[in-house]
Image: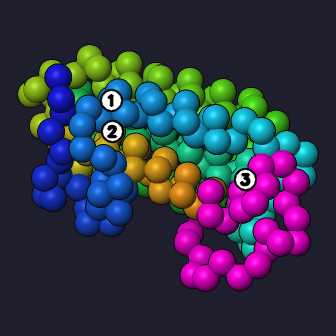
Amino acid sequence: MTLERPAKDEYDSYYGLYIDQAPDGEVLDGMSREAERTRELLADVSGAAETYRYAEGKWSLREVVGHLIDTEWTFAYRGLCFAREDPAHLPGFDQDHWARISNAEEIPLPRLLETFVRARQSSVAIFRTFDDRTWLRRGIANGLEFSVRAMPYILWGHELHHRKVLERLYLQGSASEPEASDLRDLGPVEAA
């Protein structure tokens, strides 16, 4: 089954940033492929590069992956709650606070990447159980209304967004140790 892209009234416009980055096609297969590509992209990163920050106050590479994991779990859970027509209004989450108090900085990158891929596999497994009616159900999270089918598009686009940030601001020229040449002016800085 090819899941139709959500209509603009199925998510807040803020999330269009992510949904628009998700390519057309089978979103669940794409989510599975891209998680592996993210792991491959970062597979050779080691040493100080794992805790590299492209600017003061920005997340380390490990914290970015930790953020991908937190987001995966959060939005998959939201999708499941909406699919089950849970009447609760789900809370939002402060990504910066979560990153600050997580222990992602202390976890080796290979372990974080394995956790991300497993979280993604779990999300896809949950989403594959939904039928056509389920995808159209809606719920409230962080005071905003979403459809169930917006969740996989948000997750996939969110990953792709952060992968672009990783490639541009963390992996410039080196996938192991950052060098002075990696710290050159990179133009406008995207939010990690």
- Name the element at disc 2: helix
Q: Earlier in the sequence, mark 1 or mark 2?
A: 1
Drawn side of residue 152 relative to residue 45, left or right: left
How far is disc 3 from disc 1 in space, using C-alphas? 26 Å
Q: Among all residues in the image, which is located at the extreme left?
A: 133
Please give the label number shown on residue 151: none
Which residue matches tag 2? Answer: 152
Q: Name the quarter where the N terminus is drawn.
A: top left
- Name the element at disc 3: helix
How far is disc 2 from disc 3 in space, using C-alphas? 23 Å
Q: Residues within 10 Å of mark 3 (few under 14, many from 20)?
A: many
Circles 1 and 2 in contact, beta carbons < 8 Å: yes
Instruction: Identify residue type, mark 1.
Output: Leu
Query: Residue 139 location, x and y as percent?
Result: 22, 44
Q: Residues within 10 Å of mark 1 (few under 14, many from 20)?
A: many
Which residue matches tag 1? Answer: 28
Q: Quadrant of residue 38?
A: top right
